[in-house]
Amino acid sequence: MPHATLRARMGVIAATTTLTIVGVFAATATASTTGSSLTTTAAPTMSLAAPKPATHHARRTARQIREAKVRRVLREARRQRGKPYVYGAAGPHAFDCSGLVRYVFMHAIGRSLPHNAAAQYHSVRHIQRRHLQPGDLIFTDNGYISHVGIYAGHHRWWVAPHTGTHVQKQRIYHAHFLYGRVLVVHKHLARHHHRHRHHH
């Protein structure tokens, strides 16, 4: 075979081989790019909103539980309106001051309190005047605790005042008072509650 013809054929083979290799590289690059694009498209998007702290939810739930209990307590106190004061009475037809408080909390929320104003003061959480909220207890302190009523808000309380009167919501008079809270909802109880959705 002439040398010229042989060189021509070798050139064709080399060119064909080069084109084939280039084509393989191109196809591989395209597949890689396509796969990468698909992978990127299929990747889940991440929410930018930060989750709310569990402690905030617990505080909100505790507040809601307490507010519901306050409503029950005040509603039960209102049901006793007009019943006469009788010393030593604890309901259901007559009350003295601590007897009224004891009856209301027992029937509203199942909380048992002593039938004695001083004993009630020592069995609840003590708070300051600025923290007073509806449902809290107000005690008259004359050197000893002599009287108790249930704070109703707006400077009024539910109380059985004295002999010759009846259970009523009245404006709080001027005296030396102490304050206590029965309706205490702890955060861990609030979390538990959410998971399964307390005589003179």
Image (tube, rainbow, N blue to C red):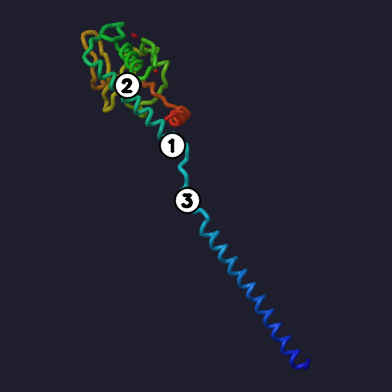
Q: Are marks 1 and 3 in contact (CB under 8 Å)?
A: no
Q: Tell which circle, 2 or 1, labels the residue nearer the N-terminal end.
A: 1
Q: Tell which circle, 2 or 3, labels the residue nearer the N-terminal end.
A: 3
Who's the residue at 46% across and 28% down the image? 192
Q: Position of residue 148 (x, y in %)?
A: 32, 16
Q: Position of residue 91 (x, y in %)?
A: 29, 9
Closer mark to the observer between disc 2 and disc 3:
3
- Badge 2 crowding class, 10 Å Cα cut-off, few under 14, some 14 to 19, many 20 or more, is many
Q: Amino acid at mark 3?
A: Ser
Q: Pointer 3: what residue?
A: 47
Q: Pointer 1: what residue?
A: 57
Who's the residue at 67% across and 81% down the image? 16
Q: Is residue 130 above or below residue 85?
A: below
The dot on residue 73 is 2
Q: Is residue 165 above or below residue 29?
A: above
Find the distance from the CA under tag 1 to the CA under tag 3.
Answer: 20 Å
Q: Where, by quadrant of the figure, is residue 52 drawn?
A: top left
Q: Position of residue 189 (x, y in %)?
A: 46, 27
Horizontal side, residue 187 vs residue 159: left or right: right
- Badge 1 crowding class, 10 Å Cα cut-off, few under 14, some 14 to 19, many 20 or more, is some
Query: Which is nearer the eye, 134 or 118?
Result: 134
Q: Are marks 2 and 3 in contact (CB under 8 Å)?
A: no
How many numbered circles does the render carry? 3
Q: Where, by quadrant of the figure, is residue 144 drawn?
A: top left
Find the distance from the CA under tag 2 to the CA under tag 3.
Answer: 43 Å
Quadrant of image for the N terminus: bottom right
Q: Tell which circle, 1 or 3, labels the residue nearer the N-terminal end.
A: 3
Q: Amino acid at mark 2?
A: Val
Horizontal side, residue 81 vs residue 49: left or right: left
Find the distance from the CA under tag 2 to the CA under tag 1.
Answer: 25 Å
Circle 2 sits in a helix, a strand or a loop, which is it?
helix
Closer mark to the observer between disc 1 and disc 3:
3
